[in-house]
Image (cartoon, helix red, strand yellow):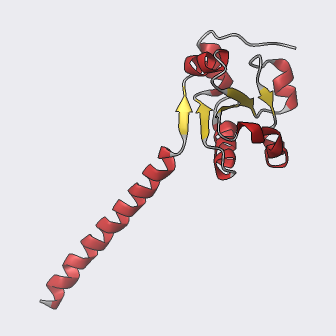
Amino acid sequence: MYLMTRLFQLPLAIGICLWLSSSLSFAETATMSTIAPKEAATMQANNQAIILDVRELNEWQEQHIAGVIHIPLSQLQDRLPELSRYKNSPIITQCRSGKRSAQAQEALQSAGFSAVYNLNGGLNAWLKDGLDTAKR
């Protein structure tokens, strides 16, 4: 009987661990919302959201989405007060491909910003969809 109990406990323990880890992964992805470039463009054009470009200055100077707020990811923590008026408004984070903007999204959410979206695919996807940019 003791051996049967032990044999049953191991698969049960493994199952519980797997269930908990999948729940945590789901919780993490549930808070990491993305938005398609065309939807982001529409929201920006209708003044329903701001776009935050977190690329470095040299990247932004080469090409950027018109009307964005530019704060490089490396400066975001120090410059959060500049965004305080958008704390309860939709913010779309954007970089070249979506990786740095995902980090910015997480930082903004941790700072209490309520509606933060990551531009799916970044500026690369924006350009692929044929959307306009400004060049300096």
Q: Is residue 71 above or below residue 124?
A: below
- The C terminus lies in which quarter of the figure? top right
What percent of the width, then of the height, locates residue 112? 66, 50
At x 76%, y 42%, the residue is 84
The quarter of the image holding the N terminus is bottom left
* Residue placed most toward the observer, 13 or 118: 118
Q: Quadrant of residue 3?
A: bottom left
Compared with residue 48, is residue 28 higher up or lower down, i.e. above or below?
below
User: What is the x, y in percent for residue 74?
Assistant: 82, 44
State the residue at coordinates (87%, 27%): 58
| Residue 93 or residue 122, whichever sits in front | 93
Q: Quadrant of residue 21?
A: bottom left
Instruction: Locate residue 24 relative to residue 85 in the image: left or right.
Output: left
In-front residue for pair 30/73:
30
What residue lies at 63% left-to-right and 40% top-to-bottom?
102
Total number of numbered labels?
Answer: 0
The x, y position of residue 77, in whole percent, is: 80, 49
For residue 134, side relative to residue 95 (left or right): right
Judged from this view, the residue extending furthest toward the left is 1
Q: Is residue 68 left or right of residue 3?
A: right
Q: Where 84 falls versus 9 (above or below)?
A: above
> Residue 55 location in percent, x, y?
78, 32
* Occupied quadrant, residue 8: bottom left
